[in-house]
């Protein structure tokens, strides 16, 4: 009965998916299947942004800053249907999309996560005000399911957002860096984890991931890696 009241929908176009008790529906409709642009090589060797020239090693942002994390990866380029999907996920309470996002992240990057010897997954936290407004943390939903798929513990309360910062999309590059300074704080000054994976929904300039990684390392983490659902281009 639930599938009649709440039919599964395509995470990209929001169209209703075919359903049968004998044949489970595909997670994406036939119109949208394969139309998303994955963040494939050549990519920045630090953050994972797609690059225009395979001879380049780093994107513009990473070439200008000291990255606190070891390496980052992302699933899709942030545009078109992916952009619209993430907007509905965050602002229209489409929490069910987290299942598809997490399965794709594991399918594409499960091997990489294993090679990084990740001991714990930490979602990028929201401020308490934004968490109350939205009712959930989108990064936490995805992180929990990725952790469950891979058998890796997820710590949702180890890293806190102690400043209610402005939305990064409203700011220029310099403002983004200053906006997030000392925005994060660990609950303990003794983080006894060597390899941590940070998860977020969107990676733009990397300021959020960088500040979160910096705080985790300050508290004792040895290496921090990053994983995002989507990312901008490096050119």
Image (cartoon, rainbow, N blue to C red):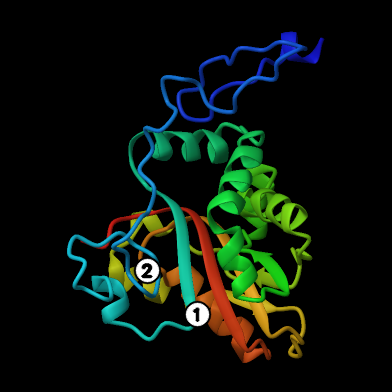
Query: Who's the residue at 72% across and 50% down the image?
Result: 145
The residue positioned 42% from the left and 82% from the top of the image is 67
Task: Indicate the secondary structure of the residue bearing disc 2.
Answer: helix
Task: Let me know if residue 162 appears in the view.
Answer: no
Residue named by callout 2: 176
Image position, residue 40 (x, y; %): 35, 55
Q: Which residue is mark 1?
A: 69
Residue 233 image point, x, y percent: 28, 56
> Which quarter of the rendering shows the N terminus?
top right
User: How many numbered discs, if any?
Assistant: 2
Dot 2 crowding, Cα within 10 Å, few <14, some 14–19, many 20+: many
Residue 198: image x %, image y %? 59, 67
Query: SS of the residue at dot 1?
Result: loop
Residue 30 is situated, as x and y percent measured from the top left of the image, at 46, 20
| Residue at horizontal 77 percent and vertical 84 percent from the top | 188
Q: Residue furthest right?
A: 1
From the viewer's perspective, is residue 81 above or below residue 18? below
Picture quadrant where residue 110 is located: bottom right
- Can residue 88 be seen? yes
- Disc 1 crowd, CA 10 A, few/some/many (<14, 14-19, 20+): many
Residue 204 falls left or right of residue 52: right
Residue 128 placement, left or right of 163? right
Residue 217 is left or right of residue 79, and the answer is: right
Q: CA distance from mark 1 to mark 2?
A: 17 Å
**In front: mark 1 or mark 2?**
1
Of residues 111 and 60, the one drawn nearer to the viewer in this rendering: 111
């Amino acid at each position: 009965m639930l599938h009649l009241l709440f039919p599964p929908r395509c995470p990209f176009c929001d169209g209703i998916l075919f359903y049968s008790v004998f044949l489970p529906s595909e997670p994406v409709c036939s119109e949208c299947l394969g139309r998303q642009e994955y963040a494939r090589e050549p990519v920045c060797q630090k953050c994972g942004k797609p690059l225009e020239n395979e001879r380049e090693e780093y994107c513009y942002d990473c070439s200008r800053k000291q990255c606190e994390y070891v390496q980052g990866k992302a699933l899709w380029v942030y545009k078109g249907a992916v952009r619209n999907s993430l907007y509905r996920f965050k602002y229209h309470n489409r929490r069910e999309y987290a299942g598809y996002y997490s399965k794709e992240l594991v399918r594409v990057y499960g091997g990489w996560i294993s090679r990084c010897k990740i001991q714990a997954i930490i979602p990028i936290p929201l401020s308490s005000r934004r968490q109350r407004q939205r009712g959930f943390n989108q990064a936490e939903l995805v992180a929990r399911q990725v952790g469950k798929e891979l058998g890796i513990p997820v710590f949702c309360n180890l890293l806190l957002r102690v400043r209610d910062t402005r939305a990064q999309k409203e700011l220029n590059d310099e403002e983004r860096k200053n906006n997030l300074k000392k925005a994060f704080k660990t609950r303990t000054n003794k983080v006894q984890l060597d390899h941590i994976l940070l998860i977020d929904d969107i990676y733009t300039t990397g300021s959020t991931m960088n500040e979160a990684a910096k705080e985790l390392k300050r508290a004792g983490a040895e290496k921090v890696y990053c994983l995002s659902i989507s990312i901008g281009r490096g050119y």
